[in-house]
Image: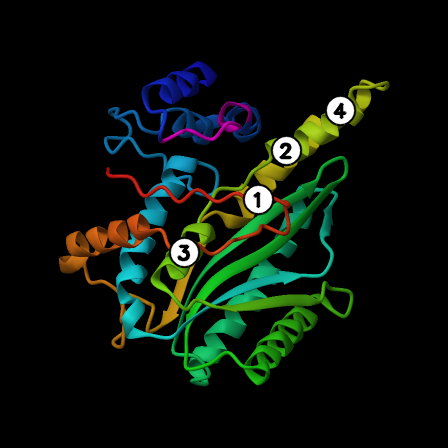
Amino acid sequence: MLESVRKKQQLYPKRYRDEDYLRHSALLLLSLGGRSAVRYSLCGVRNSANPSGICRLHKFCPYCSFLEKQKALAKYVPAYESGIWFSIHGSFTGDLTMNSTTDYYDLLEYWDAYKLALRQLVKDKSIRGVFWTEELAVNQMLPVHVLPHIHAIVEADNMDEETITKLKNMVSANLKNRLGPDCLAPNIKIKNLNSPRKLLSHVQYQIKPMKVAKAYDLAWTRASLNNRAQAVLLNSQLTDLVSGYSLVTNRRFKINSAGNLASKAKPYIGTRKKEIKAAKECVREVLEAGVDYIEMEDRETKDSSLSLAFERN
């Protein structure tokens, strides 16, 4: 399976250009196992079992994540002039220690806290629409420390202190109702997206696969020095991380929308299916202009790099 991944990178260097792709894939293949590992290794290869050739594991696969990103860009970037746009980084202070696969169910409570609060803001007409993604940052291994969080774009007249405080209080209340007082406190950052390029950059940043290679390699340096048992424990924790995350997110939507940014809603302001070709051209024009780049920083992984490539299928 890893040889198949290596060949894909040679055949499609733009699709799989991440320098950590092979390392990341090796760790995933060993941890996923079974049909998911086969699907991942054969992503991009049409076969009788999967005629589309797409594994659809966009929470792990960079190419499938890229395809989802293309869809989102075509939906929202052409709608820039139809709204007033803001970004939300919805995280928490601190992180969670995962001791077993059952601990991963707590992730759902943290994501749900933001989901319920954002939908309530739409219902209260504090905002008109929201598009958000649920992510998991792997901060450390041996032991495993992770941070569930969300990234969102919002269409609203304003995101003032009153609205931000309201969002924060609702997220906190949702968590305490489910997990009690000993939960992480919400940490929310808001930015105004006052140009098409800034909107494009943030939508791109919202959709990306979980990365495990960096945290694993840092832990491996410590694990392999003296006591080989620590290396065995590290590999066991990695398997629990990948399987636990997969288990709790099975059939759960990582990518969500509500209000006028939901394509099935009556007030939807984004691109309709019949307009998709023109929308993709609009995205390319915004990308090629390249005059108003928004610097994004992934605080959880301390990785400020952001690829802005918008490729043709």
Which residue lies under the disc numbered 1? 245
Whether residue 11 is situated above or below residue 305 in the rendered picture: above
Residue 161, numbered label: none
Q: Which mark is residue 214?
A: 2
Q: Earlier in the sequence, mark 4 or mark 2?
A: 2
Amino acid marked by disc 4:
Thr
Mark 2 or mark 3, earlier in chain: 3
Q: Could you tell me which secondary element the residue under label 1 belongs to? A: helix
Q: CA distance from mark 4 to mark 2?
A: 11 Å
For the record, the magenta segment spans 15-23
Counting residues from the N terminus, which is met first, the one under dot 1 or under dot 4?
A: 4
Residue 192: x percent and y percent? 47, 70
Badge 1 or badge 2: first in the primary sequence: 2
Q: Nearer the viewer, residue 238 or 202?
A: 202
Kindly identify which numbered label has been placed on residue 221. 4
Name the quadrant of the N terminus: top left
Marks 1, 4: nearer the viewer: 4
Q: Is residue 313 above or below residue 146?
A: above
Neighbour tally class for label 1: few under 14, some 14-19, many 20 plus, Cα within 10 Å: many
User: Callout 2, which amino acid?
Assistant: Lys
Q: Does the stretch in magenta take in 16?
A: yes
- Where does the image place residue 226, in percent across and percent down from the top left? 86, 18
Q: CA distance from mark 3 to mark 4?
A: 35 Å
Q: Position of residue 273 (x, y in %)?
A: 18, 58
Q: Is residue 74 left or right of residue 116?
A: left
Label 2 sits on a secondary structure element that is: helix
- Please state which amino acid type lies under the numbered disc 3: Val
Classified by dominant secondary structure, the portion drawn in magenta counts as loop
How far is the residue under mark 1 from the one under mark 2?
A: 17 Å
